[in-house]
Image: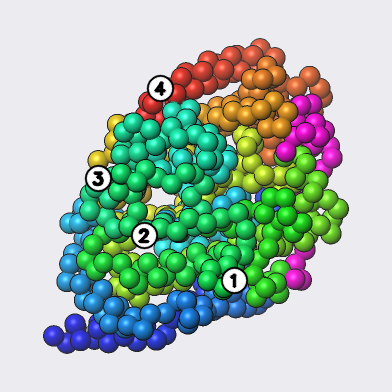
Amino acid sequence: NVLGFIMACAAMIGMTMFKATPLILNSAGPLDMMDMPSAMSNINNGGAENENPPRAKRETATRITQRNLGDDENHDDDENDTAKKIHATTQQQQRQQQQHDDGSTTTRSKPLNIVLLYADDWSFTSLGASGNEYIQTPQLDRMAKNGMLFTHNCVTTSICMVSRATLYTGQYASRHNTWKSYQNLTMFEGDNWEHSLYPLLKKAGYHTGFFGKWHHHDPPKHIPTFDKRLFYQTAHYKERNGVVKHITEWNEIDGMNYLRSRPVGQPFMLTISFFATHAEDGGPEQYRPMNSSMWMYANTEVPHPKTFTDEHFQALPPFLQKSANYGRGRSLKRYYPEEKYQHMMKNTYRMASEVDATCGRIIDELERQGILNETMVIFTTDNGNFHGQHGLAEKWYSFQESLMVPLVIQDPRMPATATGTKTSEFSLNIDLAPTILRAAQIDIPQRMQGRDMAQLYLDPTEAERTWRKEFFYEWFGPHDHLPSNLALVRKDKKLMSWPQYDVYQLFDLEADPYEEADLLAKKDETTAAAARALTQEETERITNEMKSRMAELAAAAKAGAKL
């Protein structure tokens, strides 16, 4: 028929005109660089968007999104025929979601495809849509406009290998007990792996592809996990068959090849697991973007975070100030003196913009194939990152910069009333696997501890009543290098525990979003928190209540309870 002929022609045209439309969402006003998410509450409450972003920003977005991959690696000779077959099949199978006047949606007749764009060591503020007016992430900002931005998305343990095991299992670290790369095999023991994310998708008939950073031993061979996979990480430039490319370019090439060669008509999950913006630990440069990106941010001076001062470092507990502390040592190596700070931060931002551009082209490829409207796309990362806040670098600890990470979900089931909005509910990395499984119409195993985040946009009224209002954070490490750190996190208060030193810290996040004033410290404070300082009796009452609750949640996490 005429409609089918037109759509087929559109698919063929799309093959020859690779789409990468730059679209910039401006932040909701100035935000102190790498600042605390309580300032995020101001963003959540609105703020006028700048509909005319600076010319330099528009040009930056355009140039980075229009980079094309080499024909030698990314284009198949028969891609036109493949695209037409995919498009025709998906159009035949597709049943459009019914949108109702009240914003609700009917259940789709078939499972969604899943694309997980999983970055590395990415601060929650390293996103234009989160209020950072210096970084260029137009494609992820576009994704936020077409989906939902989760402004209080957190990890339950802030370190690469542990957080990734949590992604795969949907469990707290104290439950999956996989703490170290290439040493712990707990999540692979017994029947544990059979009930994890990717084997469950495979069992349900999904075609699965994973490309990039895995950070553990290979999955058990006797349990089907991936149809296509390539695991690689550690260096920003990789050689294959005599060809050297940036690791983010390889991520994109592998992702595109998967999308263009996947079985037609079979639901799929593609994971692109970026190494960026992780540093090359031990290397002289630490952050090495593509040569083609070096012009970006050349004329930008990256501001310091508010807590990037000697005074804030000296306010930390004494054991965190030891030279043996990895967080302090790496901060001194990366961010001092000022020239090095500018160099490192600009290269970090360049790598983030490269990931952003790849995400945009992956989404455009889904649209070109005619399957974006039946695919859930998720962008998030494994942990946050200090960029000099409190005099520290990296992650591990339960300060906001470390435990808060970006999360954007674009979901064809999302009602118009939710599209382009933000939620400030606590979402956690234990929620990723359950959310993906439910989008695939697979029951969530009892052993998974998280929840389906789609409830936050499919049934927000019920979610407001039943969603978590607090969560438990855990990290267990050696005394001096990476001391253990537990926390109970709420919107208004945070209680930190350093169990190896029997030290507690209490922060009033509403009055003190940058965690400058420890209410349990025996000293005078001059910050805004002091103006609302609690009496000693109130402080003791709150501390004791939160200690008790933290112990309850710690036991529940270890026991495998739903949290």
Q: Amino acid at mark 3?
A: Ile
Which residue is located at x 71 percent, y 74 percent? 295
Label drawn at residue 537: none
Q: Mark 1 and 3 residues: CB-CB less than 8 Å, in contact?
A: no
Distance (Cα) linking label 4 and label 2 = 34 Å
> Which numbered disc flags the more N-terminal residue, 2 or 3?
2
Location of residue 171 (image quadrant):
top left
> Which numbered disc flags the more N-terminal residue, 1 or 2?
2
Foreground disc of the pair 1, 3: 1
Foreground disc of the pair 4, 2: 2
Residue 154 in sight in this render? no
Element under disc 2: strand
Q: Which residue is mark 3?
A: 442
Element under disc 1: strand
Q: Which residues are magenta?
A: 298-326
Q: Which residue is mark 2?
A: 228
Q: Which residue is mark 4?
A: 559
Q: Mark 4 and 1 residues: CB-CB less than 8 Å, in contact?
A: no
Camera-nearest residue between 131 and 311: 311
> Which numbered disc flags the more N-terminal residue, 3 or 4?
3
Q: Amino acid at mark 1?
A: Val
Label drawn at residue 244: 1
